[in-house]
Image (cartoon, helix red, strand yellow):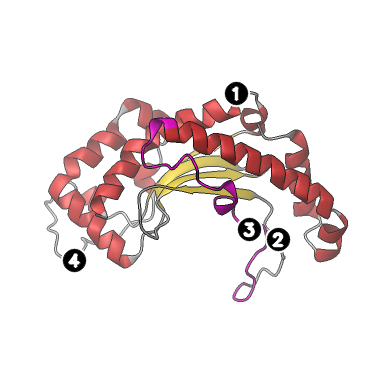
């Protein structure tokens, strides 16, 4: 589970996002990071039991994202993120496809799929929808998926038909999507619960068919 102290650290960091404060509280950060790394290790092992695309031996350090922000091209010059991000990739190749857990006081969420694919990958996904749109439609129309990921079809999308596809295509609504990410928000208590790993895996299991559809599209 995620400790209350980890949430406390993130809350304090959001209120004191500067290098002097962070340096003075580096030990607290290290404790919070260790908590997240341990949680990630357990999460990977549990996911690997149900999804063969997840390697149970994946190094948690490769999944937990850096807390240091890249401020070179940003107007926001705060040096640190006020969250921990866990990105567990699936399949092969250098993509952002996989499972994601965002840990932030009162703003945590669990998700999966592929957020804003590259133009090349988006073209491949649309081609798969053209060939096999019924499969994706069945996944996102499943009652249990809708219960937890109802906003899937409300993501950023094209105003017009994608090039090469007609207006009467049966899955035009899916072809117009620019992103294929499923997100479910979590409260702090869900992640601090002793059953937090099982609860997160429960949501991610519902995303697994979506991930597998996208993996198929990219191969």
- Tell me the mark number nearer the camera, choosing from 4 and 2: 2
For image coordinates 59% across by 76% down, the residue present is: 73
Q: Which mark is residue 163?
A: 4
Q: CA distance from mark 4 to mark 2?
A: 40 Å
Residue at the disc numbered 2: 80
Q: Position of residue 156 (x, y in %)?
A: 38, 55
Q: Quadrant of the C terminus?
A: bottom left
- Circle 4 residues within 10 Å: few <14, some 14–19, many ≥20: few
- Tell me the mark number nearer the camera, choosing from 2 and 1: 1
Q: How many marks?
A: 4
Residue at the disc numbered 1: 195
- Circle 2 residues within 10 Å: few <14, some 14–19, many ≥20: some
Range covered by the magenta-colored residues: 49-74
Q: CA distance from mark 2 to mark 1?
A: 29 Å
Give whichever of 22, 167 is nearer the camera.
22
For image coordinates 65% across by 42% down, the residue present is: 36
Residue at the disc numbered 3: 66
Q: Answer whether residue 53 is magenta in the image.
A: yes
């Amino acid at each position: 589970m995620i400790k209350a102290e980890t949430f406390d650290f993130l809350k304090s960091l959001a209120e004191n996002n500067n290098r002097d404060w962070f340096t003075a509280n580096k030990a607290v950060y290290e404790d919070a990071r260790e908590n997240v790394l341990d949680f990630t290790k357990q999460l990977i092992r549990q996911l690997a039991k149900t999804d063969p695309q997840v390697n149970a031996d994946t190094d948690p350090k490769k999944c937990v994202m850096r807390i240091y922000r890249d401020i070179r091209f940003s107007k926001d010059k705060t040096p640190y993120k006020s969250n921990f991000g866990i990105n567990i990739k699936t399949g092969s190749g250098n993509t952002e496809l996989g499972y994601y857990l965002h840990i932030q006081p009162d703003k945590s969420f669990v998700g999966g799929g592929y957020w804003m694919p590259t133009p090349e990958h988006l073209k491949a996904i649309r081609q798969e929808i053209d060939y096999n749109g019924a499969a994706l439609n069945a996944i996102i129309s499943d009652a249990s998926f809708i219960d937890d990921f109802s906003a899937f079809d409300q993501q950023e999308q094209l105003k017009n038909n994608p090039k090469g596809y007609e207006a009467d295509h049966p899955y035009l609504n899916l072809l117009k999507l620019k992103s294929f990410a499923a997100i479910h928000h979590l409260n702090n208590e869900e992640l601090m619960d002793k059953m937090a790993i099982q609860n997160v895996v429960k949501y991610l299991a519902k995303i697994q068919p979506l991930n597998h559809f996208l993996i198929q599209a990219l191969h």
